[in-house]
Image (tube, helix red, strand yellow):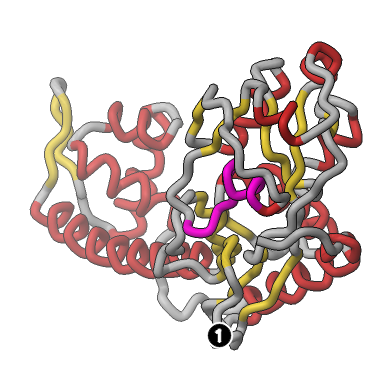
Amino acid sequence: MPKSPYDLPPMSALVAFEAAARHVSFVRAAQELNVTPAAVSHQIKALERALNCSLFERHHRGVALTETGAYLLVALQRGFEGIGEAVDQLRRRAMQASVTISVTTAVSSLWLTPKLAQFWKTHGDVSVAQMVSDTDTPPAQCDLSIRYSILPRDRTGCTVLFRDRLMAIASPGFAAAHPVTSLADLAALPLIHFETRIAGWTDWQGWFQALGHTGPLRNSHRVNNYLIALQAARDDMGAVLGWVGLARTYLHSGQLVPLLPDQVTPREDFHVTLHAPHSRRARLVYDWLVDSAGAEHPAWHASGPRL
């Protein structure tokens, strides 16, 4: 067999010695390495025979490093530190190889996470991390971001995923207990108001105004998370503004139902932006999301009253 270019003793013996020398104890080294003290002693004796020198002074109360042993410990620790730094850099690169997507809580839960489950079926080697934040500005370190806003003038690396529509929805029980035939009827019911810092988000007042109703609204429940708003509606607490596309799972299952057929299409779109154009993996995820959204939701661009 070809000889190793480094002419080193067995690595297992060097590892056992380093642990024993660092702890100045065969027992503690054995605990760290998950072996028996006898196994550690055997490895060190083999290393001493290979080097033809004593590395430890053995006493009935324990062991102590010899001068030669101390010299070898310093050399090994320098070598292991260099290896550790190289391994850490490789691990960091592996972490950086993942694609990070900045997304809001609602879009993450209702749209992106289910989509990523499909993505990984064909691209299992691409790691995708979500950075969930309900603010207008995505973090600087993200590769992609999905936001609800008017498409920016500079559309470089920015594509509309879908345009959704808003309608009044509630639980079947709430709908049965509160028959609605007009916007005035709806305005008098308990309404779940979603308060957010996202600019341009359509609220109940804007929705009613788009449909020509300017009368007073009932001020009932207020929440600052869209998923909580949907849950409150499912719990019969009131009516909520529902995205026809995003909330389709609840609508198709019958957990939530429309109170009126009226729908409003906001000026804002849900769009994805590519912040790392030179990343092959980020580009792959970006293209896949755009293609998937276009294939799955061709009707999400339906017309209706606009804000």
Q: Is residue 150 above or below residue 171?
A: below
Mark 1 residue crowding within 10 angstroms, few (<14) / some (14–19) / many (20+): few
Question: What is the magenta range?
Answer: 199-209
Amino acid tagged 1: Arg
Q: Position of residue 113 (x, y in %)?
A: 70, 48
Q: Is 300 left, or right, of 72 in this rendering?
A: right
Residue at (42% x, 68% y) in the render: 141
Observer-nearest residue: 131 or 234? 234
- Percent position (x, y) of residue 142? 48, 67
In the rendered image, the vertical position of residue 90 relative to residue 183, given as above or below: below
Q: Look at the image and say whether residue 85 sits in the magenta stretch.
A: no
Per the image, the residue denoted by label 1 is 153
Residue that appears at 65% across and 24% down: 188
Residue 205 covered by magenta stretch = yes
| Residue at 61%, 83% in the rendered image | 157
Q: Is residue 148 above or below residue 6?
A: above
Question: Residue lying farthest front?
Answer: 215
Residue 51 lies left or right of residue 176; in this view the side is left
